Amino acid sequence: MNVLQRWRAVRNLQGDRLSALPLLVVYLTDGCNSKCVTCDIWRSPRRNMPLALAESLAAEAQALGTRWVLLSGGEAMQHPDWPRIAQMFRQTGARVLLLTNGLLLKRQIEATLASVDEVILSLDGAQASTYAAVRGVDGLALVLEGLRLLRQNGMSVTTRTTVQRANYAELGQIIDLGLAYDVTTISFLALDVSNREAFGPRTGLIPLDSVSVDDPRSLSALPPGALSVQDCEALADLIDALARDYAPHFAQGRIAESPDKLRRTLLSYFRALHGLEVYPAPPCNAPHFSVVVECDGRIRPCYFLPTVGQLRPDEPALSQALNADDALAMRRAYRQGQRPECGRCVCPLYKSARGLWSM
């Protein structure tokens, strides 16, 4: 990103129009080879992003000042042309990240090493039985072998654990695994239990306007994966133990979230389901510097907000779609606190003007 593009990125924060697009998230496919109990995307027939659409996005990326491209899905590695698409974005000068469940890493290790700059690997259990309970497939050994090969070849790897009832007790063991495999960063986020835009047509979600600290009540049925009150008490003790036992790794940033942030983003989030706390609405301005393009060309300000446009084969211009009326209205609405999804977001992303300048 040159100086002019950096200024354009910073200028994004002054209004609701995007002058630059530092981060582009590309959902290459909506198919997945996991069968997670908290996600229904794998139940639908797989659709892959047409190569022509990916080519048009790559062609625009450089002009838009895109510095980071995240390839995701579904499972991005199921797209038959994903390495070619990754390399197209790298040729624009962008840093390409691959978000993956890791089940295909061993089989496609050479393509991965040659095509991306960093891997974000889902690691949702430290034991095979836990992993299978969360992911619906017996794949932990395969994932760890892929992880070993990545680190053996010097690939930067962040492990990302979606914390839920089945795996929260293993957070320490997951950290130990990450350290044993010498991963670059270890990260945790809470399981989303309310958003109807992400993860397919899930059932049993908590309505966005339901339980509050002013109206405490017991939930008749917890969503799949949500922590109970007793689980929250155990998680509080566990985070205290992690803060003590892994203090050097927190201090070094090896564990991405500080103990205080884990208390906010995990413990407070799940406690709020029971009316014991208010939802810790996180700071986020992702729609002012990033966009998600789904496999069929639909555009979202982020994964957790509704679509605001559609790229079509005969009109693929992302630069125009970014500032269409619906996109501007959505940015204005979230900025003014009018989107309830943002108050319970489990994956916020915030960049200051200085942060955008340095991206």
Image: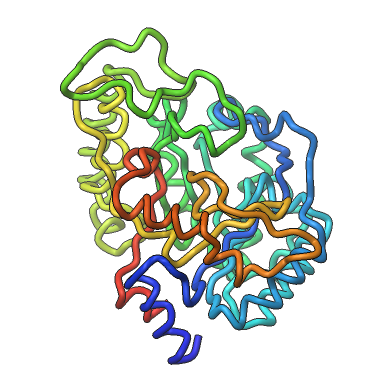
What percent of the width, then of the height, locates residue 48? 79, 50
What percent of the width, then of the height, locates residue 218? 28, 10
Front residue of 336/114: it is 336
Residue ranking furthest to the left: 214
Number of marks in picture: 0
Give the quadrant of residue 215.
Answer: top left
Q: Residue at x 30, y 34 (%)?
A: 269
Q: Is residue 139 above or below residue 29?
A: above
Q: Residue at x 63, y 57 (%)?
A: 293
Residue ranking furthest to the bottom: 3
Front residue of 182/284: it is 284
Question: In the shown orientation, is residue 58 left or right of residue 350?
Answer: right
Front residue of 126/339: it is 339
Q: Residue at x 74, y 32 (%)?
A: 44
Residue 182 can be seen, yes or no: no
Q: Residue at x 73, y 38 (%)?
A: 33
Q: Is residue 120 above or below residue 288?
A: above
Residue ranking furthest to the front: 325
Q: Is residue 272 above or below residue 316?
A: above
What percent of the width, then of the height, locates residue 131? 57, 32
